[in-house]
Amino acid sequence: MLTVGLNHFLIVSSILFCLGIFGIVTRKNAVMVLMGIELILNAANINFVAFSRYGNFGYNGQLMALFVIILAAAEAAIALAIVLNIYKTFATVNVDEIDRLKE
Amino acid sequence: MTESSLIKLAIVILFLPLIGFTFTIFFGKKIKYTYILEIATVGIAFLLSAFLMFTKLSSYVDNEIVSEFTWITFGSTEIKLGMLLDNLSVIMIFTVTLISFLVHIYSVAYMKGDIRFSRYFAYLGLFTFSMTGIVFTHNLLMMYIFWELVGISSYLLIGFWYEKKSASDAGKKAFIVNRVGDFGMFLGILLLFITYGTFSFDSIFSQIASGVLPFGTETGLTIAGLLIFCGAVGKSAQFPLHVWLPDAMEGPTPVSALIHAATMVAAGVYLVARVFGMLTGDALFIIALIGMISAFIPATIALTQNDIKKVLAYSTVSQLGYMIMALGVGAFTFAFMHLITHAFFKACLFLGSGSVIHAMHHEQDITRMGGLRKKLPLTYYTFLIATLALAGIPLTSGFLSKDGILAGATAFASLTGHWLFPIAGFLVAGLTAFYMFRLIIITFHGKPVDEHKYEHAHESPKLMVVPLVVLAVLSLFIWFTPNPFNADAGIFLRDWVKAPEIFVPDNARYDFMVADHVVSPGESSFYEIVYSEKYSEAVHSAHNPAIIISLLMALGGIGLAFLFYQYKKVDVDKLAERFKPLYNLSYNKWYFDELYNGYIVGGTLLLSRVLAWFDNKVIDGIVNGSAAVTRGFSSFSGKFDNIVIDGWVNFMAYLSGFIGLIFRKFQTGKVQTYIVLVIFSLVILLFLFKPF
């Protein structure tokens, strides 16, 4: 019978990470890019918790995961505020069109 | 008074007129009465000079008071300035300040209402100051400085009415002609300085006496003497530089009296008298020759002039020629005496002519006057006395000095055989008497020519007449000698004025100037001091014939003048017609101005034209040529800059632009691209460094 071990967790988190990267790189909508970032953060959380369960590190990993969740919430609030401001300034949230940095 | 306090007195006299000048020139416009201060300073200077002269002549008659101080030190050469008080300088300063003071008083009335009234007095003060400097100096440097100061004040006063072109031209002419003479004088001073290393008369003389000569020869000394004499030729208006003096009459008449008759033009004679001790026989002979020519030519010119001041001007040149000739023939004492007597009576004549001009409302042409004797009695009589003095009639001072000069010239001729000097002298005496009485008769006698002006003529105010009377009285014999026929009897020649010691080597002197025996100091016999016995004998025997001939010549001249102009026995116009060439020669002043204009001024113009051509063609050609070459070079250099240097720089810029073009592709400005790149590079780095 299949026993769920550390490797399974790591594979899931890698898939999640890659999906996050894929989302960040390919999405045009800034909100979708933010969602990609959330995925990457959660991939990291899975790693923290998995290593906490199977490694000999005590509860540090779980605590760090809690921190990341709080941080992600704060990050989402600030990032959405930025997106709102971008929309006010450029009348769009399409990241391809916001390329003033080039000039 | 001690000697040092006399020197202090002299310094005060020197600077008083300068104070007057300074105040009047700076405050004359604002404060109306500064001219009174100026006159007062000259008046005080005159009183002090009188005191100085009498103290010097009574207490220190045989002393030479010198005071000097070091002005500048160059290495081991010290340049000293100083004052010299001897009998010559104190008598001269008395004369200068007296005439200056009288002219100041006279000018108050004469210049009344002039727009530059106070400046006029300032200039007079400047002149008095500079003339005082010339008189008191004990060295050639100070002499030269004050010499030029006198020249500039003369220039300012001749051109005083500069609105008139003739006046400003005359001022320039006087200044430039004087500069010609001064140039020679400057060379002479330099020659003496490089030879003796000093400017002061005394040390130059003592070095000559000890045998040091310029270039080591007597000829060098002759050259030095003649170069110094050049200054006198310019300032004393001697031939060939006499042309400025008649033109100088464009200045106000009191100025002519002070500067161009009595004092400044006498400075040249004074200079020659100062350096008399270093003049060799050859130099003296040339000086005598120039003096003779200058006495004769202007006397003939004065015969036909119709401008009252021009006649007097030529007469002045002629009389200065007399003095110079007298110095040249060795009659030193009489030359100096004539300088003083001439100063008084010529100042009187000029101020008298000023009075006439004033009365006739600035009419100077004597042919438009006539009969003024009744209208201007005081002017007439003072003018007459001065004229008698100038003509050399007994009882006047002029007779004494002129007779002495003629006797000296005769004695010189009898010793050396040059009879031209006395003959010219006697001739000039006759001519002088003739032209002066021609002037008097045409101006004061006869019938008025211009009735209208005659009616309005009036005797001048007291301020003008008093100086005339003073000067006329000073033209009498009594101030110089108690015996009107023998000047030697007077204290003036017996004790005061003596021929100076000669320092020239014996072989370079006139023979008669070699002393027969060594003279101990303090031995105060008259001629014997420096001259030989045979000279005093010759003078003694020439004395009486000279008196008789000169008297005959003068009386003949006066008689002819009366015959021609008073009684009209001879038709002068016909006479002029008959001797047309001679008349024209005299009337046109021997064509000196034309000659100088034609050859000297014209030559200078020609030379400057040649130089201008040279400048335009050659110098400008060279300048333009070098400019063209430079332009060629810079054009090449510009092209090099534009093509090579700029090309390289532009290429570099283009290259960086091109590289930038490639690399800017990476800079999309899209964060997502950057993230892709970051991940891509991270993966590469991980593979490269293989941390696992």
Image (cartoon, coloured by chain):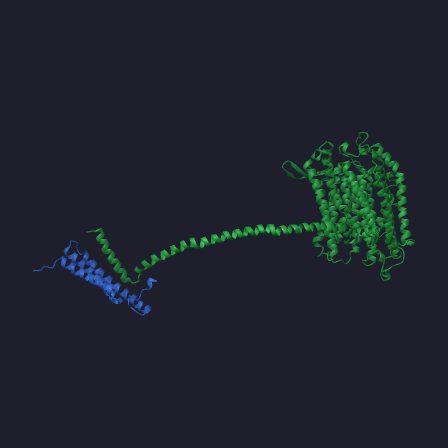
Residue B516 lies, in percent from the top left, at 82, 30
Q: Which of the two residues, B449 or A2, is positioned nearer the viewer here?
A: B449
- The answer to which image quadrant residue B531 occupies is top right
Residue at the bottom extreme of this rendering: A91
Residue in the foreground of this view, choosing between B21 and B689: B689
- In the image, farthest residue toward the top: B517
Along the horizontal axis of the image, is A53 left or right of B440? left
Q: How many marks?
A: 0
Residue appearing at x 48%, y 52% in the figure? B636
Residue B409 against residue B27 in the figure, above or below: above
Question: Where's residue B128, x and y in %?
Answer: 75, 48
Say if B270 sits above or below B217 in the image.
Answer: below
Along the horizontal axis of the image, is B238 left or right of B639?
Answer: right
Residue B166 position, x and y percent, is: 75, 55
Residue at (38% x, 55% y) in the render: B651
Q: Colour of chain B?
A: green
Q: Which quarter of the rendering shows the C terminus of chain A?
A: bottom left
Chain A colour?
A: blue
Query: In the rendered image, is residue A16 in sight?
Result: yes
The reply to whether residue B461 is in sight is no
Question: B609 or B494, which lies in front?
Answer: B609
Q: Residue B202 at x, y = what percent? A: 73, 36
Quadrant of image for the N terminus of chain A? bottom left
Residue furthest toward the left? A1
